[in-house]
Amino acid sequence: MNTIASVDSLTCPEFLAMERSVIDDFVDCTREACEEAEACIKELNHQGGASYLHRLFRAMHSLKGNCQMVGLIPFVELLHRLEEIVARVRAEQDIYFRELGEFLLLAIDEIEDLLNELISHGCTSDVRRRQLYELCDALQKTGSGGLQPQQFKDAIDLLDGKVDNRDGNVKIPRVLLELPDDLAMMQKIARQIDRLNIYRKNRSEQTAQLTEALNEALGLPANARQLEAASLMHDAGMAFIPHTIFNKEAGLSREELKIVQEHVITGSQLLLRFGGWDEAARMVLDHHERFDGSGYPNGLSGQQIHPGARMLAIVDAFCSVTNERSDRSYRRSLLSAISEINANRETQFDPDMVDVFNDVVRKLLARQT
């Protein structure tokens, strides 16, 4: 339920209290829907066919659905009015004309700005939202004469004046120049890495959760915050590997393998660039070292390998086995995955950490039964 902090202030505490990853997903999905709507309108303005009207309606419906899912009801009501205008044209009750499209573009811009303000500052202008709602409501309720270009031209003039003059004639930029929290940015990068391959769905989140559980079970040998950063960024370097190699199903050549192995260097360098994440960078650099010294990039062994990297190596391998891959016909069970981890204790993995990881997985199995 929304609470009003002042006469012109709309806040949504329940939405703002959601996990940052949920808000980031909402922003990404909303931006995609807005971009789709804008692309359809541009095509319609250049004599695009009915298919663009259908796509435009779906984009508007997605915008409304996104707000509905996170409880932004005032925006749901506003977007429903815009959706109804598009629905009339889609159902051939009215014809499409350029002024209608231009109004939709301006209205979408205003909604994006309001949402950006809400997310960035914790509140936004309810007066602006209500004014846009009332404008859309009046247009949608046009009677038997149908939608007319002049009505939308007048609405554009009215809305454009309000947008341009809302803050001393300085229009708020749609893309804000601000620096997000480091871990929030790392989570966003991790999600993008996971989207590079259909078999990596939620892989980074799963890795972060299991390394946290293993670290706690071991008595926190690694700084929890640094380990979280390393878990999120351990495969960030994969983004710089050519897709032909990243998604190759056959065996890799020696040169291709060398390119893949460079991802640990790139990932660690990215963390160093963030500043203040030196320990996490070391974990990323070391997480493909093997306990027996046969790993890369430096051939470290045993206790030479950072404890966070030794934990990450176990969890990364476990997540790789339990996720579907193009060369597997089924998802491997947790039990078979932990068996594979145990088979490589003392060679690939720290045996003491593997013993504790067995307990972590047993608890995970117990929760799933």
Image: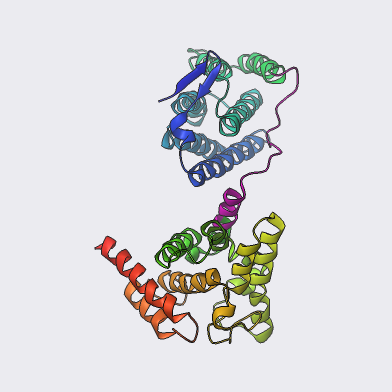
Q: Main secondary structure of the magenta part?
A: loop
Q: Nearer the viewer, residue 199 or 321?
A: 321
* Residue at 60 percent of width and 74 percent of height: 286
Residue 276 drawn at (x, y percent)? 66, 55
Quarter of the image for residue 124 reads top right
Q: Quadrant of the N terminus?
A: top left
- In the depicted structure, whether residue 71 falls above or below residue 245: above
Q: Is residue 148 positioned above or below 62 on the image?
A: above
Would you say residue 252 is visible in this rendering? yes
Would residue 86 appear left or right of 265 to someone viewing this image? left
Q: How is the image coloured?
A: rainbow
- Look at the image and give the residue range highlighted in magenta: 167-191
Does residue 174 belong to the magenta stretch?
yes
The location of residue 37, given as percent across then percent down, is 58, 37
Q: Is residue 333 visible?
A: no
Q: Residue at x 69, y 39 (%)?
A: 178
Residue 176 in picture, x, y percent from top left:
69, 36
